[in-house]
Amino acid sequence: MNKKTETVDTSKRKLLAGAGAVGLTAALAGGPSAAQAQVPSAGRGTDYSDVKVARNGRYETVPLRQDSINVTAIQSHVRAVDIRDLRRTMKANLDHIIKLIDNAQGSSMDWGGERLWGSKQDLLCMHEFPLQGFQPWTREQLLRVAIDLPGPETEAIGERAKRYGCYISFGAYAREKDWPRHVINMSILMGPDGSIVSKQWKGRNILGLFGEGALIGTTVYDVLDRYVEMYGWDATLPVARTDIGNIAITAVGAEPLLYQCLALKGAEILVLSVTGGSNAESAKQVARSNRIYTVGIGNAVTPDNIGWADAAGVRGDGSLIADPRGESMAQTANHHEDFASARIPIADFRKTRRFPEVPSALLLPVLQQYEPKFKPNAFLDKVPETYKEAGEMVRAKMGS
């Protein structure tokens, strides 16, 4: 190697190293970098300055109302509403949710509503579909099943959150007025004042796992360009900064990079709410690899669930709350409806937290140049009417 070649190669290394060091914030949610000019965009803005991400171990928070919090994972049925009897079956599911909330707080209405067992819980976590369940509905049917935010259902759950002075997370199919004909797979966090604290869209659907069909609920990835235009880059991987800690909720399964990015954005408690997909082992792995508290919520055995076997989606190891070492703090005892409760020393965690080191200079060239088979924005021009049509769209996109 001659001196001129050596000088050029050294300059290239410096450029790549600089792009990598600064570019983690671009690839994994941060500020603009020199590397952006090399990354083509499908119409999405490349100003990432709104993204709230940890820098040198520091991240955005709000003051805590107490040093430790009590958290409960509610492992419940996943009973689908009957589209032929929607009002009654939706009310039955909502009533059951309210009963589970009361029971988790040790304040069963059958006991007069007074707390007669256990401690006040500060955060109650439910799975992806406790209200509506899951069916291969058509879009017209799903638009009927979906709820408004706010609406009667969130008002009822919010009343319980206010009564107990707690936060409650749950998943639902939701309608949004700015997204006509879309049905959003939404994670919702209710606050102790009874209002919606955070609406967190599902990041993306896992594709190619449903035979010839595919899911038709809209995710961030399905409409990425318009979503970023409306809400900004920070909202693509949302973290709710509350007075009991930073909380992220995701119904995306088997997505280690997504979980890591939520942790890098300052999530302290990550709720994995994947119906039929969350389990104790995955919760422990996510907690250990990201050094955060993780709540993995599975669904319970559900007799007489329309179209499904009683145990559809049930995992034998149940639901679990894991600490940042990946150790179990609490776990359900079986596959029936059950609670797992643990006390999290959130103030101590915040003081002593150390992030896993991410070698951005090493990883960024791969992340920037990798091209997935299924591109974003599949639902921008047209939303599929059925699972079969969605499957055809998936195959067409993956074949392009």
Image (spheres, rainbow, N blue to C red):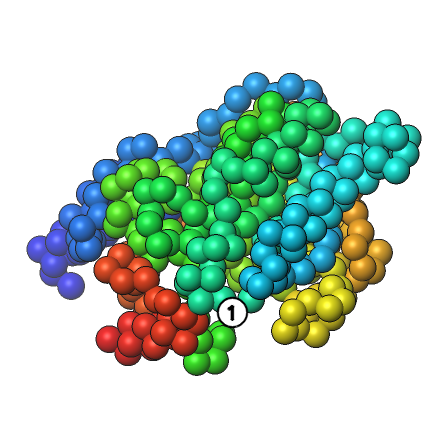
* Residue kind at label 1, given as amino acid type: Pro
Q: Residue at x 32, y 42 (%)?
A: 178
Q: Is residue 338 found left or right of 63 in the rendered image?
A: right
Residue at the spot x=58%, y=56% of the render? 86
Could you tell me residue 34's position as x and y percent?
A: 20, 43
- Quadrant location of residue 55? top left
How far across and down, in percent of the image, does residue 236 sit? 38, 44
Q: Residue at x 65, y 55 (%)?
A: 89
98 relative position to 214: left or right: right
Question: Which image quarter is the N terminus in?
Answer: bottom left
Coordinates of residue 35 in the picture (x, y in percent):
22, 47
Q: Image quadrant of residue 391? A: bottom left
Q: Nearer the viewer, residue 281 or 164?
A: 164
Can you identify the residue that label 1 sits on?
A: 136
Give me the residue at 79% from left, 29% from top: 120
Task: Report if residue 100 is visible in the image.
Answer: yes
Is 2 placed left or right of 302 in the picture? Answer: left
124 vs 16: above or below: above
**Label 1 crowd (10 A; few <14 / some 14-19 / many >=20):** some
